[in-house]
Amino acid sequence: MFYGRVSTEDHQDPVTSQARQRAQAGALVTGFGRIVGEYFGVGQSRVLPWVRRPEAAALLVAMADPDRGFDAIVVGEYERAFYGSQFALMAPLFEHYGVQFWLPEVGGRVDFSAEGHEQMMIGLGIQSKREITRTRIRVLTSMAAQAREQGRYLGGRPPYGYRLVDAGPHPNRAHAAWGRRTLRLEPDPGTAPIVRWMFAQRLAGHSLARIARALNDMQVPCPSAADPVRNAHRSGAGWAVTTVGPIVGNPRYTGRQVWNRQPTEHELIDPGNTGLGHRQVQRWGLPDGWVISTKPAHPALVSEEDFIAVQGMRAARVTAHPDRRYLLAALLGCGVCGRRLESCWANGREAYRCRHGHTTATGPAPARARNLYVRQDRILPHLQALYLLLSGPDPVDWSAVPPADMEVIEHLRNRKITLIYDPVSRTLRTATPRKVSVILDRAHWPGRSRAIREIPDVWKGGTLRPPERPHRPRADAWVASRHVRICPAVYKLRVRGGHARYVHALRGVHHSRSPWSGGLSGGGAEHSRCSPHPTYDDRWCRATGADRGGRVVQAHARTLPASR
């Protein structure tokens, strides 16, 4: 079975290369056998392992078939089949299936157990890898010199505001004989004025979002809409902050050629299986790695002085409130659209919001959902109860002492756990296989009867049994409990008359206490509904609220065992 490969990167002719390689392979096996089939790959680099080359992978499948119609594999050149240490990985597989391997550099069949053949394969692998490395270094250094000294356009999509025009025949006579010509950048009459206007607006102090919104309001086509042929992978929906930012930060608008802003890197596909090789990724490089031409290479759309002034406006803004701490940043998700909540300052406190994809760069859509807001101080008191539900046994041991808030936050970050906030039910749930949730705020519920109806859908896995005769609460004030460490599950207090009512955040348990004596009120019938909750022994809960007259009162209640 013949195997060959050709890479089109060097402008090779696949038909000619295939014929040459097969002729070399046929001459090698003459007198020993004949070639009964072939697997020839086009456009595949030798750097790729066999399992990632389509034709080589198909050959491996055929080799594993017990009824295969061949007993050996022959190649025309070592470099067409292997790179680096690939032969050392494939040789045990050939030997396992009883398939011989014939190579011109050896002069025939490779002996997998011969030390001389093994050393030759190692040397050929190093030579094959060295050839690729040297070629890559030569190409990169040549392109850097062409961009720096000649200001040559080296390919890629032209920046928004420019178009490509012919710049004459290729300077290499061989390439010129093939008909290749060079290109250069020229201002586009339709989009160049837009770029100049964007820089002028930025110099006037306008934000990127304001510039983007103005462009959308004027119905100016965004770059992907203006050039859909080269931007088929983009939607072309409109301007965004991420569109305006790269334009005002591109030094090519000063007339100088810039190369290597987004270099190609190689990273392992699977660190646990290095045999799969590397994949190419492109990442934005730092300015110290850019190659900038020493002289202007095309007409400028903005002066260098103005460009530098615009970059200075991108400096980080110094906040006037260094004491603001967003402890839950990057930990909260939106229960409406699934996006991650962003930090914000709301009503003088740390908060988090989701605008459901809306930005100030575009006008609000009529059908867009209302912005979601949740304050940080409404979430922190429930982290300990959430931790007990998430990491504790089932049923939860409420007598266990949970860690501090910062330890819970660190626990969530280390395990990459996201907390999803649902604004409808006002619950906070975990995006984990074990679904747990807690209720953040019941203050906005219109009545207890509605709360009881929604309890089964809100409290997952709870053991609540609603009272037989629900009653509507009066217009009393509900306030968050100041007590967190002792009893994180008890978090609400309603003051009515002379009594304080504590509500359990997870199971809906009601503790009715006298705020002045700490004793039971309502009798045993009222407290019998608290049986699902093992309360804390000899501990005190404290909360502050207001009675119906608006007078501030402070209630102290000692939690009692459920058996009492």
Image (cartoon, rainbow, N blue to C red):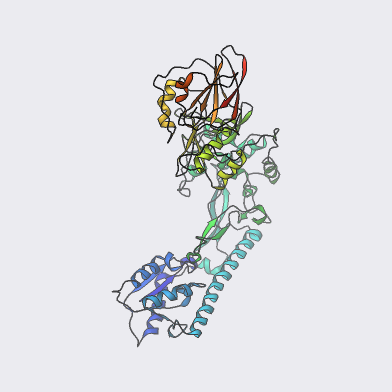
- Looking at the image, can residue 19 be seen? no
Image quadrant in which you'd find residue 93:
bottom left
Residue lying furthest top in this view?
549
Give the quarter of the image for residue 449.
top left
Q: In this orientation, which residue lies closer to the viewer: 359 or 17?
A: 359
In-front residue for pair 241/352: 352
Question: How many numbered discs?
Answer: 0
- Determine whether, in the image, residue 152 is placed left or right of residue 356: right
Q: Residue 452, how many percent across, how many down?
A: 42, 24
- Quadrant into which the N terminus falls: bottom left
Rendered position, 178 above or below 359: below
Residue in the foreground of this view, choosing between 538 and 141 = 538
Image quadrant assignment for residue 349? top right
Whole-percent x, y for residue 109 in the image: 41, 84
Most distant residue in the front direction: 564
Residue drawn at (50%, 81%), measured in percent from left and top?
118
Q: Can residue 93 be seen in this view?
A: yes
Of all residues shown, which one is farthest toward the left? 67
* Residue 309 position in % (x across, y down): 70, 42
Measuring from the top left, give residue 121's x and y in whole percent. 50, 79
Direction from residue 405 to residue 109 in the image, left or right: left
* Residue 330 vertical placement versus 474 (above, below): below
189 or 359: nearer the eye?
359
